[in-house]
């Protein structure tokens, strides 16, 4: 009779899996809580302590660490190993279903203590997984509940799990324990080393250009593009994914219904409004020419109104936390437009990686001004209420524009939106000129945000000629007094934040 050892923390699907094994004539061995669950489901199960003749000790810290268990797992199908098991009264174990204490989820909780973290470091489970994976020539390892049914299907069809499947499951086990150990190392000493486990999602048609190969990876096994699900359209490209990520990060930075339109990794329109449709229209009006062939992200579900508002605009991709049935129906006419349903409004992971020659750069994600930041009005004139609303919006929007980032924004009724965006130039005053050109007459009465300080007063002077009435920037230049003087001379309100938001 083949033997299966079941010892899991996540018990999703376990009872059905165990029942399937039992029906096929397998003997079930299980530890502690797993054994109780199976008995409550009416299944015959041998508890690990009864199987080994050794009780659980140290408050459950030691359950499966016994030669009867690991000898049964690691024994090969050769005469000398079989003789060793027989001499000691042990037997082969043919399958292991095991997953681990939730260490990563535990340490992600606010206020978790070191003692709590330590108790969620799995020892026995990791050892079971590695033993079964090492001996996958004979032993089947199942460490992911999603593999329960495929394993049962193979057993029902052929009476055994195929060599190819056992090898694949073993690889998954080693990947799990590698990630687990890396998470523990990272928690105990964040600077000791950087270990990253990623899982291939799909091989992309090409990278930024057709002669470059590219693959999309996920931090989670089975993850989709950007953690979401593609509902419609052809395969996402490398450039689509970069643009969608930029648009999504910008859209979810705002609390109100908001839309960001991105073209070639640069926002060309951002807006917040009472409805997503109104936000889209305002974002589009910022730069209609650049919006053609761009990507769109909204921080609310796409409804029929916003889908209709798109009209015949050619859109590469749309990301949103959901798509209403009427939106799906309307957008289905844009057959090449990819729709990506995002699972949550949170940005994960909370760090960014970039390759450099010979290594990597890692930094925390810029989630905006740190707590305790204090804005100060340094001009003679205070901003009006409408200017304050536009300044707050523009300050968030400029954080998603490539440095030197300049954003012109305006409040019109209940809508606040960009009217001109300039960025990515080697000097700041050119970015002001670009934003002014994009805005045209709409710059009159608008405000301006700059991601970093003004090294010279020329940017303020160009903005004043364009019709800007209020400005927000970090301050900190040796020529700040000249900038203040230029603002006062133009009758502008000038606010400094003390916080820089470069985005290279």
Image (cartoon, rainbow, N blue to C red):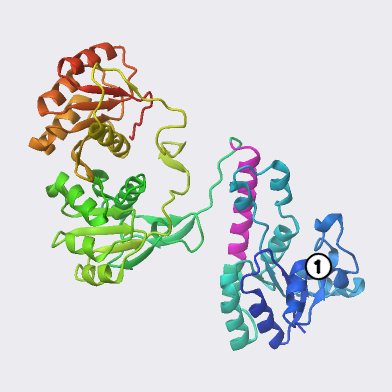
User: Dot 1 corresponds to which residue?
Assistant: 69
| Majority secondary structure of magenta residues | helix
Q: Residues within 10 Å of mark 1 (few under 14, many from 20)?
A: many
In the picture as drawn, the residue positioned furthest to the left comes out as 441
Q: Position of residue 402 (x, y in %)?
A: 28, 36
The answer to if 183 sits in the magenta stretch is yes
Left or right of 150 in this view: 224: left
Left or right of 77 in this view: 153: left
The answer to if 353 sits in the magenta stretch is no
Q: Residue at x 16, y 34 (%)?
A: 435
Q: Residue at x 17, y 33 (%)?
A: 446
Left or right of 244 in this view: 459: left
| In the rendered image, the vertical position of residue 203 relative to residue 187, given as above or below | below
Q: Residue at x 40, y 62 (%)?
A: 202
| In the rendered image, the vertical position of residue 177 relative to residue 419, given as above or below | below
Whether residue 485 is visible, yes or no, is: yes
Front-lying residue, 279 or 436: 279
- In the picture, the quarter occupied by the C terminus is top left
Front-lying residue, 128 or 284: 284
Left or right of 237 in this view: 307: left
- In the picture, the quarter occupied by the N terminus is bottom right
Front-lying residue, 231 or 142: 231
Q: Position of residue 224 (x, y in %)?
A: 42, 61
The quadrant where residue 490 appears: top left
Front-lying residue, 116 or 236: 116
Q: In the image, which residues are magenta?
A: 170-190
The quadrant where residue 42 appears: bottom right
Q: Position of residue 115 (x, y in %)?
A: 73, 44
Whether residue 427 is visible, yes or no, is: no
Q: Position of residue 313 (x, y in %)?
A: 15, 59
């Amino acid at each position: 009779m083949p033997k299966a050892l079941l010892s899991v923390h996540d018990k999703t699907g376990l009872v059905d899996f165990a029942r399937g094994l039992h029906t096929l004539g397998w003997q079930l061995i299980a530890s502690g809580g797993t054994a109780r669950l199976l008995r409550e489901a009416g299944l015959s199960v041998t508890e690990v302590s009864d199987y080994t003749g050794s009780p659980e000790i140290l408050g459950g810290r030691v359950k499966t660490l016994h030669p009867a268990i690991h000898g049964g797992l690691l024994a090969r199908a050769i005469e000398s190993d079989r003789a060793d098991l027989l001499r000691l009264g042990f037997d082969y174990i043919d399958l292991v279903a095991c997953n681990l204490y939730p260490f990563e989820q535990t340490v992600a909780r606010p206020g978790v203590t070191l003692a709590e973290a330590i108790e969620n470091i799995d020892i026995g489970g990791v050892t079971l997984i590695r033993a079964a994976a090492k001996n996958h020539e004979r032993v089947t390892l199942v460490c992911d509940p999603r593999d329960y049914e495929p394993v049962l299907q193979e057993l029902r069809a052929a009476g055994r799990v195929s060599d190819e499947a056992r090898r694949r499951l073993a690889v998954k086990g080693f990947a799990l324990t590698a990630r687990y150990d890396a998470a523990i190392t990272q928690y105990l000493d964040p600077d000791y080393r950087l270990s990253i486990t990623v899982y291939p999602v799909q091989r992309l048609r090409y990278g930024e250009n057709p002669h470059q190969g590219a693959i999309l990876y996920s931090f989670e096994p089975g993850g989709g593009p950007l953690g979401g699900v593609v509902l419609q359209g052809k395969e996402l490209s490398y450039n689509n994914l970069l643009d969608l990520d930029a648009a999504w990060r910008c859209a979810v930075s705002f609390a109100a219904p908001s839309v960001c339109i991105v073209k070639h990794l640069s926002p060309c329109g951002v807006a917040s409004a009472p409805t997503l449709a109104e936000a889209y229209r305002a974002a589009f009006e910022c730069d209609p020419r650049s919006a053609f062939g761009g990507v769109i992200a909204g921080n609310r579900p796409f409804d029929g109104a916003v889908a209709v508002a798109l009209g015949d605009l050619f859109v590469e991709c749309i990301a949103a936390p959901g798509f209403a049935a009427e939106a799906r129906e309307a957008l289905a006419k844009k057959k090449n437009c990819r729709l990506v349903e995002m699972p949550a409004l949170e940005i994960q992971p909370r760090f960014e990686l970039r390759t450099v020659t010979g290594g990597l750069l890692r930094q925390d994600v810029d989630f905006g001004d740190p707590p305790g930041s204090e804005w100060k009005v340094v001009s003679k004139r205070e901003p009006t209420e409408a200017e304050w609303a536009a300044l707050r919006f523009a300050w968030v929007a400029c954080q998603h524009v490539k440095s030197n980032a300049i954003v012109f924004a305006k409040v019109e009724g209940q809508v606040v939106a960009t009217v001109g965006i300039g960025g990515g130039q080697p000097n700041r005053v050119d970015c002001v000129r670009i934003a002014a050109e994009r805005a045209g007459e709409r710059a009159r009465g608008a405000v301006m945000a700059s991601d970093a300080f003004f090294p010279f007063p020329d940017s303020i002077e160009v903005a004043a000629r364009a019709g800007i009435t209020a400005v927000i920037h970090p301050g900190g230049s040796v020529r700040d007094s000249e900038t203040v003087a230029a603002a006062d001379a133009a009758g502008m309100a000038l606010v400094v934040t003390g916080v820089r938001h470069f985005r290279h």
